[in-house]
Image: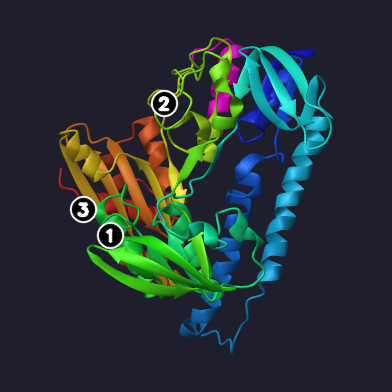
Amino acid sequence: MKHYDAIIIGSGQAGSPLAKKLANAGKKTLLVEKRFIGGTCVNDGCTPTKTMVASARLAYLAGRCNDMGITIKGYTVDLKQVKKRAMGIVRKSREGSQAAMEKTKNLDLFFGEATFIDNKTISVNPKTGKARQFKAEQIFINAGCKTIIPTDIEGLDDIDYLTSTSILELEKVPEHLLIIGGNYIGLEFGQMFRRFGSQVTVLERSGRLISREDEDISKEITRILEDEGIKVLSNSKAIKFKNKGKNQITATVQTGDKESKIKCSHVLIAVGRSPQTERLALDKTGVKLDEKGYIKVNDKLETSEPGIYALGDIKGGPAFTHIAYNDYTIVYRNLIEKQDLSIKDRPVPYCMFTDPELGRIGITEKEAKEQGLNVKVARLPMAHVARALETGDTRGLMKAVVDADTKKILGAAVVGTEGGEIMTVLQMAMEGGITYDRIRYCVFAHPTYSESLNNLFMALED
């Protein structure tokens, strides 16, 4: 058995930088990775999907450029080339990160699946060779989540359904893609493949898409997607699949109390993700889980077992790459730099990278009302934004929720081109305590999207 100062399970956006920083701080560190360096973000998530979204946007622009005086007689989509470009970027990122780790003093890298033997010891089973045991005083879990596969759909196991990982392996554009789940992952893939040429249908169990967002934001996203030819069925669920042959699937769909049949070529499961805790054998430790299997942590990211920490998606809460990275910075600075940082009340910005994108920060209008806050709500259609008019894309809106008494910004949602970047301007204002009446008269460069924050807050009466 080999002894280390620290063991890290999983090389995602928390595990990889933490491993290097601990090693550089003089701690003998072991990083265990079951699959590829970089975790979901680099290999199956942000990096490949946003690369492919960029290709899909070019297809969309090619289809409407004639409206702006540029004539293109036609275009084709080469999905193999799209995939090749995306995977090239993935490999460069993955291999570069691995090479940097292998050169890091005090850091060992071991590929295999880890399970706990006790609260200080793990066993790692590699793809080839015998299992090995490692021991450390501190263990950090960054093992992430996996796709939830519904168990209540008859015949699902009889079809070759897709997940957010396996859909990236396609080399031909699906004829008709049926998406189970109307949230962020499903909608990004739905718009992408619609622009590549697929017929797309989205089934959402609740009454509307992205139901955690305010209703006006949900309606705007739905309108944008439907305008591109995506069929959205709310209050709907698949109850049965029948395989009729290669790429010939019949889905029985229940909408309210009515049933209908949809013929499709491919099915994407996008109903959510669950923590990869079941194979870690955490019952051998004092680490406690919640009712959904996520690891419980305190505000310092330490579990119920002293010396064991959980970072990223596996601990529950916001499942975003940037949150996992922030987890790493908090743990490192607390343990090595002896700071006293906490995850309590940190900002949680996020984006959905449809086109136009959705940028979100803070609380929604609905949440503000539920909390009984005295708020005002500012809205500005992108059709009233000069930059949007000039670039020819006026889809979307800006929205901000403000405290009527203090004039502080409590939350914002921006659906529009560069929505995430505009949201970030408002996040910085929130971080610095800058009130909306100051932003109303800020001098922004013209013509930019952020310049219209002037007009957004002009709509509010003091």
Could one spot residue 444 in this view of the protein? no
> 408 or 335, which lies in front?
335
Residue at image mark 1: 235
Determine whether 408 is above or below 287 in the image: below
- Could you tell which of marks 2 and 3 lies nearer the N-terminus? 2
Relative horizontal placement of residue 261, taking residue 40 as reference (left or right): left
Q: Amino acid at mark 1?
A: Asn
Quadrant into which the N terminus falls: top right
Which label lies toward us, 3 or 1? 1
Circle 3 residue: 459
Residue 192 in the figure: left or right of residue 5 = left
Q: Given contact means CB atoms under 8 Å apart, are the residues at marks 3 and 1 in contact?
A: no
Write the residue at 28% across / 41% down: 436
Give the main secondary structure of the magenta stretch: helix
Magenta range: 325-340
SS for tag 2? loop
Classify mark 2: residues with Cα within 10 Å, few (<14), some (14-19) or many (20+): few
Q: Quadrant of residue 389?
A: bottom left
**Of helix, strand and loop, which one carries label 1?**
loop
| Label whose residue precedes the other's in the sequence (3 or 1) | 1
Q: Is 302 on the left or on the right of 203, as rendered? A: right
| Residue that badge 2 annotates | 290
**Few, some or many residues within 10 Å of mark 3 (<14, 14–19, 20+):** few
Circle 1 residues within 10 Å: few <14, some 14–19, many ≥20: some
> What coloring was used for the rendering?
rainbow
SS at circle 3: loop
Residue 154 point in image, percent of width and height: 43, 58
Looking at the image, which is closer to me, 105 or 29?
29
Is 456 a magenta residue? no
